[in-house]
Image (cartoon, rainbow, N blue to C red):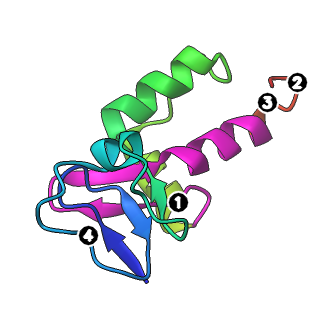
Amino acid sequence: MKQLCPHCHAEIDINLTIPEDAHSPVAMIESDTLPENVRIRPALRMAEVERVIVASGALRKSPSRQTLIRMIERRELDGKLMRFGWVVYEDSLESWLAAISPARV
C-alpha cells in the first residue's frame, strides 16, 4: 500500500498506517523505530529538480517545467501532481540523470 507522509509528502510504501503523533519520517528514522517494510521516497519540487539537473552537469540548462511535466506524464520521470504543484521522486531523477550521462557516477 502506498501512502503520502502528512509532513513531507514523500511517498511511503507501507503495510501499516503512519501514527498521528509521528513528528516526521526523519524523527522515525533517527529513533530506529521505522519498520522494515517502509520505503520512503523523497520528492523534489520542480524548482529543486531544475537546480539538481544544472548542478549535476548533465545539462547546461534545465528542461522547461512543461517539458519536465510531459516527462512525468510519459513516465520518463516518476512524479505526480500534488496540491502544491508537481513533484519528482529523487530516486527517479537520479536514475534519469545517470541514464543521460553514463560517464557520471
Reading the image, the residue beneath label 1 is: 78
What is the C-alpha distance between the residues marked 4 and 3? 37 Å
The residue nearer to you, when weighing 89 against 50, is: 89
Question: At which x and y percent is residue 82?
Answer: 24, 61
As drawn, 73 above or below 22 = below
Residue, x 42% and y 37% (percent of image)? 64
Nearest the eye: 32 or 86: 32
Q: Residue at x 22, y 53 (%)?
A: 85
Residue 13 in picture, x, y percent from top left: 47, 71
Nearest to viewer (mark 4 / mark 3): 4
Measured as percent of width and height from the top left, residue 66 is found at 38, 48
Q: SS at mark 1?
A: loop
Mark 2 sits on what residue? 103
- Residue extent of the magenta highlight: 75-99
- In screen coordinates, is 54 left or right of 79? right
| Contact? badges 1 and 2 (CB < 8 Å) | no
Image location of residue 68, percent across then percent down: 46, 47
Which mark, by number, is residue 35? Answer: none
Q: Which residue is mark 4?
A: 18
Comes first in the chain, label 2 or label 4: 4
Identify the amino acid type marked 1. Answer: Asp
